[in-house]
Amino acid sequence: MKIDRSRLEQSVQQLGRIGETPRGGLTRLALSDDDKRARDQMVAWMREAKLRVRVDQMGNIFGERPGTDALPPVMMGSHVDSVPTGGKYDGQLGVLCGLEVVRVLEEHGVQTRHPLTLVIFTNEEGARFQPAMIASGVMAGKIALEDAYNARDKDGLRLGDELERIGYLGSEPCLPRPLRAYLELHIEQGPLLEEEGLSVGVVEGIVAIAWSRLTIHGVQDHAGPTPMRIRHDALVAAAEVVGGIRLIAKELGGDTVTTVGNLTVQPNIVNAIPGRVVLSIDVRDPRDEALDRARPMVERVVKEACEREGVRWELEHYWRVPYTPFDPGVVAAVERAAKATGARYRRIRSGAGHDAQYMAAIAPAGMVFVPSRDGRSHCEEEFTPMDDIEHGANTLLGAALDLAGQAGEGRTR
Ligand SMILES: [Zn+2]
């Protein structure tokens, strides 16, 4: 039994037209009108595949296919929201490959012992409402429902109100539920699979992530009459911090990555010395101890840069998630399935956060990666070849069947 490649390809194209950008990318922010249209399309396809559709209090959509036994379901899914001018594969592919798995089982009249549930999580990207992965976070009990409802976008609109506006404020409680497993297919968003000519990544876990926020208080003044010798320029200190943070990755070596991705400069005009800069610091590594070592290094870089420029600073380390290992049993099932497809594969770690990270807290979880061309994502150029998607989807099918147990074919592992 194999997935139907042309049907899957068609669905990818059809869903990709909702929110399509002129350059062939995707802008489909969470809870926007386009997000509603994409959800409606998915719900229609789920019903066609005979799934029972339910929506929870966070707007997460579940399509349930009964099993033969009274057992917890195997859940598969991802998200359909995107970043602005993003691509048609991030999230979309996981949801559509999950749908294809269900379609193929339906077509072949295959029943499983455990039920299968297709899930679409709300606001995974965090592009419109922060934090990212907010709805799987609520489901895993890591974020309070009220806090999630009160998240606001840049125009001040509340997540809870927007859910209601697009008709996806469901009644089902958003709580941890017993699951046999959670499986998510996703694009790699890095270059490794493509560089090594592989189709499938068997994901072992998600790297540890630490976020800090640095506020630098300089002295705002006129860019003309103020001599260089009396300046306290917040942006000059920030520039040194940016360079220093990059060097930390080099010093730690291994797989450490460090990024300053967001700067807010005040007043941000041509003829004033910047008085205040707020910047973000993102440090990731598979080893939790590398983050422990990075923290005093970040503090040293900030202290030295700010003292040199004679400016005050505040540094907050406000978010950290440890390395998330996936369930060895689920990883093994994904690996067996990858092998059975004949695809070239390897074990890999995810450098990006996914809903699977929160799901791993409440269920045995695992992921299937497919390559990203040039390692790129969150951009209009995002692309995965159909040959790889086919191998990835067949891996998802095999792993789901393995974990859910085909009825009348012995016991599940
Ligand atoms: Zn994603």
Image (cartoon, rainbow, N blue to C red):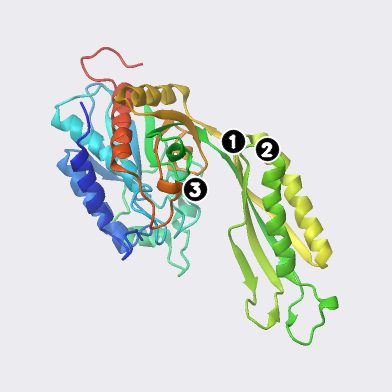
At 25% from the left and 39% from the top, the residue drawn is: 99
The residue sitting at the top extreme is: 410
Quadrant, the C terminus: top left
Three-letter code for the amino acid on which mark 1 is drawn: Pro
User: Between residues 374 and 202, which one lies in front from this camera angle?
Assistant: 374
Mark 3 — residue? 144
Three-letter code for the amino acid on which mark 3 is drawn: Ala
The location of residue 75, given as percent across then percent down, is: 34, 34
Mark 1 — residue? 286
- Secondary structure under badge 2? helix
The location of residue 111, given as percent across then percent down, is: 20, 24
Work out how far the residue at label 3 is from the one at label 2, CA to CA, in angstroms.
30 Å
At 72% from the left and 74% from the top, the residue drawn is: 275
Q: Earlier in the sequence, mark 1 or mark 3?
A: 3
User: Between residues 397 and 327, which one lies in front from this camera angle?
Assistant: 397
User: Between residues 125 and 190, which one lies in front from this camera angle?
Assistant: 190
Work out how far the residue at label 1 is from the one at label 3, CA to CA, in angstroms.
27 Å
Three-letter code for the amino acid on which mark 2 is drawn: Ala
- Secondary structure under badge 3? loop
Q: Is residue 188 above or below residue 268?
A: above
Work out how far the residue at label 2 is from the one at label 1, CA to CA, in angstroms.
8 Å
The location of residue 219, given as percent across then percent down, is: 77, 75
User: In which quadrant of the rendered view does residue 107 lie?
Assistant: top left
At 84% from the left and 77% from the top, the residue drawn is: 230
Numbered badge on residue 247: none
Q: Is residue 179 visible?
A: no
Q: Is residue 304 above or below residue 206?
A: below
Q: Earlier in the sequence, mark 3 or mark 2?
A: 3
The location of residue 261, given as percent across then percent down, is: 58, 58
Mark 2 — residue? 290
Q: Is residue 19 left or right of residue 186?
A: left
